[in-house]
Structure formats: C-alpha cells, structure tokens
Image (cartoon, rainbow, N blue to C red):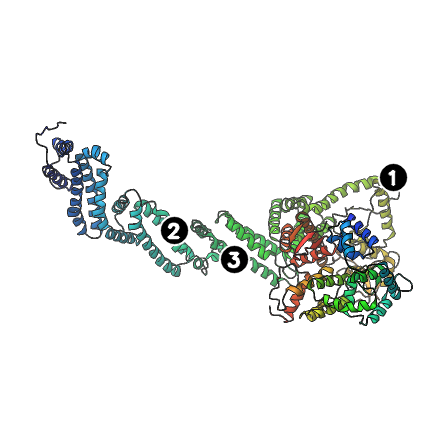
Amino acid sequence: MHKLSRSNRDKVQQFVAITGASEKNALQTLKASDWQLEAAFDVFYSQPQPRSNADVRRLEELYNRYKDQYSDMILADGVSILCSDLQVEPQDIVTLVLSWHMNAATACEFSREEFIGGLQALGVDSIKKLQEKLSFMRSELKDEQKFHEIYNFAFGWAKEKGQKSLALDTAIGMWQLLFAEREWPLLNHWCDFLQDRHNKAISKDTWEQLLEFARTVDPSLSNYDAEGAWPYLIDEFVEYLYDMSVVEK
Amino acid sequence: MSSRQNPEPMTIEEGCKLIDAAVTKLTRIIEGKPEPPFASHEYIGNYTIVYNMCIQKPPYDLSGQLYEKYGAIFQDYDKDTILPSIMEKHDEYMLRELSRWSDINKIMVRWLSHFFYYLDRYYIARSGNSSLTVVGMTCFRDHVYEKVHFNVKQVVIALIHKEREGQQIDRALLKNVLDLFVQNGMGNMERYEKDFEDFFLTETNSYYSRKASRWIQEDSCPEYMIKAEESLKKEKERVSHYLHSDTEPKLLKNVQTNLLVLVAKQLLEKENSGCSALLRDDKTDDLSRMYRLYHEIPEGLEPVAVAFRLHVTAEGNSLIKQAEDAATSGIVEEQVLVRKIIDLHDKYMAYVTDCFQNHTLFHKALKEAFEIFCNKKVAGSSSAEMLATFCDNLFKKAANDKSNDDSTIESTIDNVVKLLDYISDKDLFAEFYRKKLARRLLFGRFSDDHERSILTKLKGQFGGQFTSKMEGMVTDMQLGKDQQTGFEEYFKNTNTGKPKGVDFTVTVLTTGFWPSYKTSDLNLPLEMVNCIESFKAHYEIKTKHRRLMWIYSLGNCNLTGRFDAKPIELIVSTYQAAVLCAFNNTERLTYQELIDQLNLGHEDLVRVLHSLSCAKYKFLKKEPASKTISKTDSFEFNSKFTDKMRRIKVPLPPVDDRKKVVEDVDKDRRYAIDASLVRIMKSRKVLPHQQLVSECVEQLSRMFKPDIKMIKKRIEDLISRDYLERDTENPSTFKYVA
C-alpha cells in the first residue's frame, strides 16, 4: 500500500468503505479499472459475488469464534482451533496460502480486517465453504506466478515483528515447507551450509534471490555465473558445494 | 635547306636503299668501327630524303611506309645484331654487352629520329601513332629485353650474392643494368618489379633466413645484433648504389623479418646474453642497439618490452624473497628492502629513459612489473606498512642527525612517492603513516621542513584529500607552540594556580586529524592534577565551545629519581610516571593496590610495571623477582638503583597496532564503497550488476583495490537499507530508490 500515491490510497480506502470489500480486492479492482472509482464500482457490483451485509455478519460471527479474549485479534489459540475446525495440521502449508489470501502481517495472528477480508476474497463465509476451498488453495502453489508471490510473502509473514531479517531456524523450516511443494535437489545442502557456515539471520534479498537461484540454476551448477549479481551468501554456497565435492568445478 | 624539285617522285624502294646506306654508316660509327663521321651535308641529305618522300603528292606520299621502314630498321637491327651479340656472352660479360648495346640503341634512336624528324612533325601528329623515340625503344624492349631479362636477372642476383659474401663487384654496371629494367617499364615499375625485384626479394629472404639460423645458434645476443645491424646497413647502401629506391622499404622489411622478427624469442631469451643478462649487467650499448633495431619494426618493440617486464618482475620478486628469508622472528628489515627497491627502480628507469628512449611501452612495462611485486606481503607486513615504517625511520634519523644532507632526503622522498604509486593499498599506507607521524610529532624531534615536504609531494601526486589529515596534524604542532606561549603568558599575568615547581606543556590536537586514541581514567598524582586544572581554566577562557579530552597515554614526563647513590633524571611516559609517583608516599605497594589507586587497566599496568621492574633498568623491586608480572606481585622503590648515566630514557614498548590499523582501514573502505555505490546509482538510476561493480572499482582505484566480495556485500546492505532495489524483471540489474 505504501507504494501507492496519496490519491490512489484515498481511493482504495473510499472503495473499501463503500463496498465493504477487502483492501486487496479494492486494490485489484481499482487497478483493473485504471484507478477510476466509478468504473471500479461497476466492475465490483457486476461481479456475481455474495457480498451482502448478511455475509459480513456471518463472517463477523466466525471471527468472534476464534478471536482472542482480550484483544481484537485471532491469536495462536484461535488459530489452532481454526485449523482443527478445518481439519488441517497447523504446520500444513495451506495455512500459509490462507494467510497470503488474507495478506496477514505476521504468522499465527489475524487481525479482524485480515480475516474477514481474506475470506471475502476467497468468496467463503463459513468453515464448510472454506474447507471446500482448501484443495483450490493447494493447487495455487503449483502455479508458477502464485508460488512466487506466496514465497516472497512468506518472508515478511514468518519473520518476527520489528525485525528486518528472518531468523535462521524459521527460515530453514519455511524453506523445507515450501520446497516440499516443488523439488529442489540442493535444498538439504543449502540448509546444511547455512547451519555450518552462516549461522546468522537471512536477509530479504537473499530469501528472494534464492528462489530465483533454485528456479534458474541447474543442480550441477553448469549455468551458474560467478560474475553475476547473486547475493554474497549464494556465492558462498556455491563455494561450499565445490569444497564438499558435491559438484564438480 | 634546298628541296630538290625532282621531276620523278622517289619510290619507296629507292628511298629505302638510300636510307639503308645511311643506317649502315650510322651503325658502323656507333659500334665503334672505323668510319668517318657524317659530314653536315650528309646529315642534311638524309633528312631531305625523308622530307621529300613525305611531301610528294599522293600516291607518292610515302609517310606511312617510311614510318614502317623506321620500325623495321630497328627490328632488324635488334634481332640480327644486338640480340645475338648479347646471347653469346655469359655472366658479367653478358651484362656488359647488354649495357653497351642499350647505349648504342639509344644513340641510334636519337640519330634516326633526327633523320626521320619530318615524320614526327606531321605524320605522327596527324595519325596519332607513337613517336619515333617510343618506337625505337619499344622495339628494343620487345626484341632484346624480353628475350634476355631472365638470364640477366640471374646474373645480377648472383653478383649481389657475391657482394653479400664479401667480394667486390662492378656496382656501376649493375646500376646501368637495373636502370634498364626500369626504363623498359615504359613509365611504370612493373618490369623492374616483376622481372627483377620479386626474384631478388625471394633470394634475399632465403639468404637471410639461412644466416639467421646459423647466427642464432653460434652467436651471443649482442654479437648477433651487431651482425644484424651491419646487414641492414649494407643493404641500405646497396640500394643507394644500384637498386631502385622503391626497393628499399621492401628490402629492409625482408631483412628485418628474417633477422629480427622471426627469431625474436630465441634472441631475447638467450641464456647468459639475452635481454635479461644485458639488463642485469648494465650493457647499455647493446640495449640501445636492441631498441634501435626493434624500433624500426612495427610492433617489434613488444617482445622486448615483455622481456623487460619479466626481468624486472623477477628481480623484484627475488628482493622480496630475500627479505622474506632474512626476516628473523617476523621482523622485516624494511629499511634495507625499501632502499633496494628504490635502487632497483632507479636502475631500470635509467634504462627506460636512456636505452629505450623514454618509450611509453617501456614505461608501462616497468610500471606493471613494479605493481606486481610491490604489492606482495613480506613476513606478514604489507608493502604499505613497510613503506610507512621506512619513512618513519628516515625522518626520525634525519631529525636527530642534522648532518644529513637535505638533498638526499628530498630525493629519497621523491622515490617514496614514486613507489607509493605502485602500491594499490594507498589508504593503508596513509593510515600507517598517520599513526607513525603522530608518534614522531608528539614524542621525538621532527623536522617541520621534511614533514611538510613529503606531504606537499604526496598531495601533488594523490590529491588533497589524501594528505589533509596529516597536514592538519603538522599544523596542530605549529599552533601548539603558539598556544604554549599563550599559556605561559597566562601564568605570568594571573599568577594563580601556577603549579609549583612543575614545568608543564600541553599540546592540543584537533580530533579529526589525529588517529583515535583511547582515553583512560587514570588517577594522576596531585601535582599533575593541578597542572591539568590550570590549563583547563586557561583554555576555557579562550574557547567556550570546545571540550578537552586528555590522552595520558601520549604524554611523557621527566622525573628525578632520588636514589641513594645519586639522583638520576628519568624520562618516562605519563603512565610510568604515575606509577612511580605512587611510591612517593609509600615504600611498598601491591599490584592490587596500584590498580585501585591508579585506576589503570590490567594490560596497561602490566606493561608499565614490566618496563619499570623487569626490563633493563629496575627502578622498582619486584617480589617475587620473576620475569613476568602477576597480580599477586608487590613492588618496592629500589633506592639502591644506580647507573653511570645521569639521564635515562625508559621506553614503553608500543602496542602492536597493525591489526587495528588494518581494521580501521577496512571500516573506512566499507564506507567509501557505500558512498561510491550510492553516488554511481544516484546518477545512473538503473545499472546492471557488472557495470556497477566495475565502475565502483574504477572510482576507488586511486586509493585502494576493492575486494569484489566486499562490494557485493555492501550492495546487499544497501538493498536492505532501501537505497537500492533489484529490478523485478531482471534481478541482476539494480535501481536507485529515491
């Protein structure tokens, strides 16, 4: 949101206020209508979506079920109840996808807006409907573009509030989770390397570039360009692979 | 001129008979046979025959036929007389015949042209045919030259070969013959080139190729070069004597290629006499010859420059190795090494300016060679540090020993500046130099002139930024003197708080210029505290907005030690003085008591106590009397101490700051890299990784050679600090974030 100009930000807020749509949806619709509010309203209302007030109330009820006693957020306990309702494990990657749809700021926490907005974006207003959507959400991971977005989103989501970098253990856990969805043969070596040689937090740049590396460079490193703009850590990783004779130079 | 009015026009047959008779007479004359010369009436008569036949009315105007006749005369003469004469001779004799007959032909052409002159005037002009002269010469070419040139060429080349082998030949003859080749080209050089020059050059090629192979085996490099020079000289002479000047460049190129280019590698690398050996043994004449010979050849100097560079690099490397080997217990004799490198530089620069005529190729080779070995580490010391230490020792000695000639110091300073140019870590040098400069300025005597001189020269070479801090330091010392006078004035006038019996000097340093020193909360003896306070009071009057930070570690004191035997003046550092003064009130103090009383750090106290109780002079008695200080020791004033000297300087061994200096420089480099990266990206907005790195390296190359890995790390740091971002389309391109 902070990348938008002031007038556009205002438009988004206006849109949300009037239509009750989520911020994310508002952004998408406005962008698609070239930031013309009128046009965006047309698009929005012409979509066959159940966005009546009734839905919002049902969502609020749902929210209240999970929300924490003392603060206006769904916290860890609420999340685990949600997961058991959905009949998924809390570590299941689909929770990440769900969080992505909600544009959640931090793992294991959902604000009112995030929760309601996310479910609206998915077009569901009950647990049952959400459960039905689970397989769809899993399939989104197979889509190249969406996986990229979800992967990048995961960094901000998984890190501690107020920190710039992601703690190493969390990072390794996330990578193992994410790369279970798409095979990367060097994953284990990468994790070993980090624990062996690096032992510090992971920067955003390294996180994002790692996906690029996994995507474009083949496991024998035949097309790795040492003069390229890879982050320092990845260059070190390549050195490590050579040292450990995992790959021939 | 009478024209005979013949009633009957002359027929061609009649005319030809008369002409033939004239021709016969002419040939006899010009062949040197006994024959009376043409009388003038005969001469005129011959002309008239032709004239008349030309002006006869048609069908008796016989111009065309006369023209044919003219041609036929020559043809017959060439075929029947000239050619056979030449063909029956051999070798040199053939050449002479050819020469002779060519001359004869020329004369004949001249005479007959005169006889047939009328044709030239009217017939030829009207009909557009070739002139009489041309006809005559062309005939000679077609019927004589064409038939004999091959053999002639063989003879000529054989003769040239003879001359090359040292025999005398008839040069004038050759010149004539080769002129013939040229003439028979009828205006262009084709005949000369195709019929003679090409063969000549081929022959030359194989001749010199053979010579080269033999000489390169048998002769040393200088001998070979002398022979090569000789050969080139001789060939040049050959051209001036009988070859056509057009041949010169082709000939010289041919000889050079064979004698110099093809064997360059073997020649230059000859063991014991090649380029390396000549450089080593000061053979300036031979080297100058080498330059002269190879300078003529396009790109010929390159192998010589390479040999030069390799040799200088090897010499430099061996100096480094020697120093490395000689370095005992990790201490390098940098005075020796740096002097040797300077001498090496002078020696080889002399070669460049004298033998190699200041050619840029050699300047470049020298520079590259020095850059290679000047950046090597010797026993852990970088060249930057060694050079700084060298300067330090130079100036310390110069300040103490005034007898040293200023001009030698100046020239050494010049050499230092030159050497610094080759060192890539200039910022490291600056930092070491600064540290040592600080010590020189504060502790020893220094010569303001020398210090300023080197700074001016460094500024000239490397820019003001390089020397600004150091200049500030020297200026501070200057100002300090004035300040001290002000301080003393203050005492004279106010007479308050003047420390009794203590002479006190303060040097105020500007923080930014001087290296950073750590302060300590040393508890000074009372006398010293008074001094400090009074100076503070004075300073506060002068400047309200500045804070003084006292660095006791840099101070020194003169104390009088009242030993039993005699009082001795001790020149010690402030820390040492503080420790000693603690014994003014008590005879004995334990280590712990000293720590508590003085508030010094453990490391510092150990060092100080060691210098006072375990080193050369034992002013304090230590119990137990071991060689090292431990926390349970106790100390007592050694009243029994004495020495034949009345004044003793007790040095406090300095802490090894090499590591700290390197760390500081690394930190500065990180900032410099950051600044450079941001500057570049700010102006370019979008830039691919490769270019960013190479521009950054170039920008910083004046001060140091940045490590690529460090640059990468800094780029990542800048990304995380939101100065830069990667382009979403192409992650190896960066964008500036405003």
Subunit ID for the residue under disc 1: B
Could you say where residue B134 lies in the image, as x and y percent from the top left? 23, 40
In the image, A164: left or right of B448? right
User: To which residue does mark 1 refer?
Assistant: B494
Image quarter where the N terminus of chain B lies is: top left
Q: Label 2 marks which chain's residue?
A: B
Crowdedness near tag 1: few (<14), some (14–19) or many (≥20) residues, C-alpha within 10 Å = few
The residue that disc 3 covers is: B310
Q: CA distance from mark 1 to mark 2?
A: 92 Å
Closest to the observer, B672 or B429: B672
Give amino acid for label 3.
Leu
- Chain under label 3? B
Mark 3 and mark 2 lie on one chain; the one further toward the N terminus is 2
Q: Nearer the viewer, residue B440 or B696?
A: B696
- The answer to whether B283 appears left or right of B617 in the picture is left
Q: Quadrant of residue B7?
A: top left
Asked if labels 1 and 2 share a chain, the reply is: yes
Q: Amino acid at mark 2?
A: Lys
Q: Which residue is mark 2?
A: B253
Examine the rendering and report whether any part of residue A233 can be seen.
no
Residue A138 percent location from the top left of the image? 74, 68
Q: Badge 2: how crowded within 10 Å, few (<14), some, or many (20+)?
A: some
Amino acid on which disc 1 is placed: Thr
Write the residue at 65% across / 66% down: A238
Q: Tell me if B245 is positioned left or right of B66 in this view.
A: right
In the image, B624 versus B440, the foreground residue is B440
